[in-house]
Image (cartoon, grey):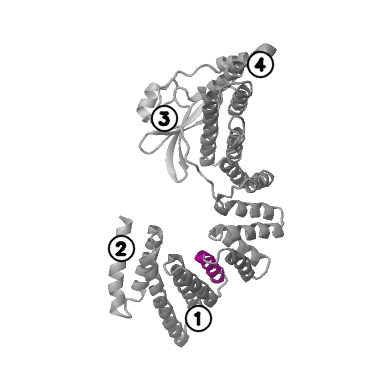
Amino acid sequence: MKKLVLAAIALVCSLQLAVAQKADADMQKAVDKALAATQDAKKAAKPATWIKLAEAYMKAYNNPTSNITMGLDKQTFQMMSSEKPQSVSAVEIEGTQLEKWSLSHVDVFFNASGMLVMTVVTKPSVKGDLLGEAAKAYSKAFELGGKEKDIAPKMKEIEDDYINDALNAYRLGDMARASDLFLGAADVSALAPSAARNFEASYNSAFTAMSVKNYDRAEALLNACVENGYFSDGNVYANLSECALAKADTTAAKNYLAGGLVSYPNNPIILTNLINLYLQTKEDPAKIVELLDEAKKTLPDNASLYFVEGNIYTNIKEYDKAVAAYENGLKISPEYDMCYYGIANVAVERAKDLEAEREALDIRNYKKYDELTDKLNQVYAEAIPPFEKCYEVSKDEQVKSVAATYLKQLSFILRNKDPKYMEAYGKWDAIVKGNAQ
């Protein structure tokens, strides 16, 4: 229903030289010393004092993983590590089997090839939000005259560290922590010297907050995204509607989805949620077409608006209106693959209805069964030309693959009705197999 946005960030996966981990007490002592210096009025006026504090926080943050080199194999890791794992267990993360070793301060994860692919700190050397404190110290140094060329890269590193940690928390299913960490990244990005908030991180914080039903945080962050022009291809509207529904405000939910549909008519989440909401509230989903009519006035040559209209009618089983909408889209854009796909899909949906009707028959009603079977074969045959046209004009390999798969299945179903279908089955079977290789 929702979508997490993942930016191309510098994940900490490169090979590094291992540095000996220091005692937690030494890290705390260094932080305390740097903090004490900021309490001295004379020293606190110098950028260097705050830079030293930031560095102390960052050293404490990095300390638990300072003797760990990403990308090592298990055997080499064991040789380099100063401690043995307290426990070893098998875990599945995002559908991938990994082996987790729990050390005193960190969990390390090896893939099936035995390569170290992820680390998660379980016991920081110093308590508290070390990344946040470091960022505030660097920002203070900049305010006092520190050079942007020195401080800005450090702030970006902190932002990326937050995001790396957030992604790891997300992968481990700890959505509350992931939300906090994404929010940390967003907050750091807004500090001087950059002062350009990362709304992608804000969106991801909202997304993960919704997973743990923290709708107040999610709503505030999503509204801030809207106010600043960040919409995540319309997903922000879909998520705001979910926040509204969590508060039983169906009117607000409809308004969010309606506004999102006009701006992002191709967003499938918005369309599906809006249709479902109209059905739940027992209102006519066809009213959604009225919203599209407003968009058509602004974008009269946008064939995708007719594709969306066709999808609406398909969802509520008004198939003739659906086909008419798709055909109107093709009048604007004769090579629009998705409108051909929509027409073919209408035939598929009609076939599903006929199949359900046939299955519900009394077993003794042979005449009606044969009648429905003939209709079913006719509808199957009607689906083939638009699927063929979709395959012919589409430049999207995924769309072509889906169309080819349907054509293979339909040709197989009809293979005994006409030799041409058996011949077509051989053609599409070869294409589908070729796509799979």
Along the polypeptide, which appears first: circle 4 or circle 3?
4
Label 4 or label 1, whichever lies nearer to me, is: 4
Under mark 3, the amino acid is Met
Along the polypeptide, which appears first: circle 2 or circle 4?
4
Question: Main structural element of the magenta stretch: helix, strand or loop?
Answer: helix
Disc 1 packing (10 Å; few <14; some 14–19; many ≥20): few
| Distance from Cα at disc 2 to Cα at disc 4 | 71 Å
257 versus 88 height, above or below: below
Q: Quadrant of residue 410?
A: bottom left
Is residue 104 something that shows in the picture? no
Along the polypeptide, which appears first: circle 4 or circle 1?
4
| Distance from Cα at disc 4 to Cα at disc 3 | 39 Å
- Across and down, in percent, residue 42 comes to 67, 11
Under mark 2, the amino acid is Ile
| Distance from Cα at disc 1 to Cα at disc 2 | 37 Å
| Distance from Cα at disc 3 to Cα at disc 1 | 63 Å
Q: Are marks 4 and 1 in contact (CB under 8 Å)?
A: no
Range shown magenta: 302-313
Disc 2 packing (10 Å; few <14; some 14–19; many ≥20): some
Label 2 or label 4, whichever lies nearer to me, is: 4
